Amino acid sequence: MAVTLNLLPAEYTVSGPLGKILKVVRMLNVILLSGFIIFGLGLAAFFVFSSIQLQGISSEVDALKSQIVSQEKTEQKAVLLKDRLSKIKAVQAVASSNKILNKIEPFLANIGQNSSLNELDIDPQKLDLTVIFRSNSELGVFLSTLRGSDVFKSVTLTTFGFNPASGYLAAFHIL
């Protein structure tokens, strides 16, 4: 048996439809407050769960970034290696210039002591040679040696000059 105890004076008591409405409002307040607390706890749990997922995704992104950087370095190395291999194949495909170098070597040995080889450009088919002769006689000996030889198809004097300080400059194109 429930005992109802009212400490308010009788004129302040709420009765009738207003009392029923107040009872319903109190029950709704309790239900809404419970729902709000449950919603707040759910929202807090959602934020905690989301932050944990965000940290996991962030670590995955960092791992993928480092993987991309390492793959970029590997790809650069592969491209450089491929480029080097193509250059090596190109060099191996070029005919050797040793043949023409062996032909011109005896003529270069006949250059006088005072004269000097200024420039030498060797291709498998041709040779460009620039020599500085200090004296007229050294130039004459070199030209007569070249003219008397049938080792080359053609010898063309491309440049000829004289400077009193350095001597004669002669450039040849030899096939």
Image (cartoon, rainbow, N blue to C red):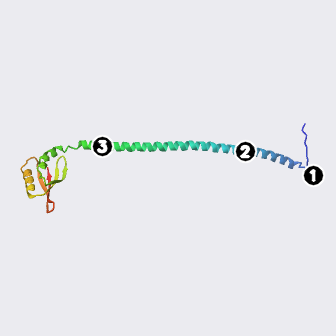
Residue 117: image x %, image y %? 16, 53
Q: Amino acid at mark 1?
A: Glu
Q: Nearer the viewer, residue 39 or 146?
A: 146
Classify residue 86 by image quadrant. Answer: top left
Residue 144: image x %, image y %? 7, 53
Which residue is tagged 2?
37
Q: Secondary structure at mark 1?
A: helix
Q: Amino acid at mark 3?
A: Ser
Checking the image for residue 164, the label placed there is none
Sequence-wise, the earlier of marks 3 and 2 is 2
Crowd class of label 3 (few under 14; some 14 to 19; many from 20; radius 10 Å): few
Q: Secondary structure at mark 3?
A: helix
Label 1 vs label 3: CA separation? 107 Å
Residue 2: image x %, image y %? 89, 38
In this picture, residue 41 sits left or right of residue 167:
right
In this picture, residue 11 sits left or right of residue 58:
right
Which residue is tagged 3?
86
Quadrant including the N terminus: top right
Query: At 43% from the left edge and 42% from the top edge, which residue is drawn?
Result: 71
Q: Nearer the viewer, residue 31 or 81?
A: 81
Q: Is residue 1 above or below residue 100?
A: above
Q: Amino acid at mark 2?
A: Ile
Which residue is tagged 1?
11
Classify residue 134 by image quadrant. Answer: bottom left
- Label 1 with label 3: CB-CB less than 8 Å: no
